[in-house]
Image (cartoon, grey):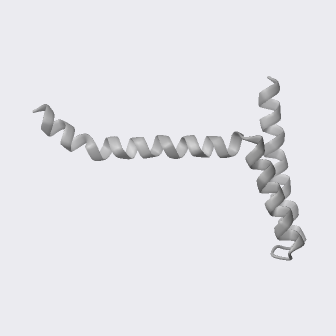
Amino acid sequence: MFLIDDLLMAPLKGMLFLGEKINEVIQKETSDEGTIKERLMALQLKFEMDEIDEEEYDKKEDELLKLLSNIRDEKTK
């Protein structure tokens, strides 16, 4: 009976595992200063190469700077 239970629960366990891994990656992406700084540099490069306009640049830059500020605040606590 346990073998059948394991087989029936395998897809659910797999989805839970994937969800946890995705969450870990998202947490790393949003809590790592280096990643945010890389995204800021990439954003600046896009702006300098006229791939995005100034309004979009300012909006995304503000979001990234707020995120960076939040990360730094969390580290000082």
Q: Residue at x 62, y 41 (%)?
A: 27
Q: Residue at x 78, y 53 (%)?
A: 38
The quadrant of the image that shows the N terminus is: top left
Q: Residue 4 sits in which quadrant?
A: top left
Residue 68 in the image, given as x and y percentages of width and height: 81, 43
Q: Residue 13 sits in which quadrant?
A: top left
Q: Residue at x 77, y 42 (%)?
A: 33
Q: Residue 54 sits in which quadrant?
A: bottom right
Q: Residue furthest top?
A: 77
Residue 44 in the image, given as x and y percentages of width and height: 86, 63
Q: Residue at x 66, y 46 (%)?
A: 29
Residue 35 in the image, given as x and y percentages of width and height: 73, 48
Q: Residue furthest left?
A: 1
Q: Residue furthest bottom?
A: 50
**Looking at this view, is 12 or 43 the one in front?**
43
The quadrant of the image that shows the C terminus is: top right
Horizontal side of residue 24 vs 31, given as left or right: left
| Numbered-mark total | 0
Against 39, residue 75 (above or below) is: above
Against 29, residue 48 (above or below) is: below
Residue 75 in the image, given as x and y percentages of width and height: 78, 28
**Looking at this view, is 41 or 27 the one in front?**
41
Horizontal side of residue 7 vs 40, given as left or right: left
Horizontal side of residue 65 vs 31, given as left or right: right
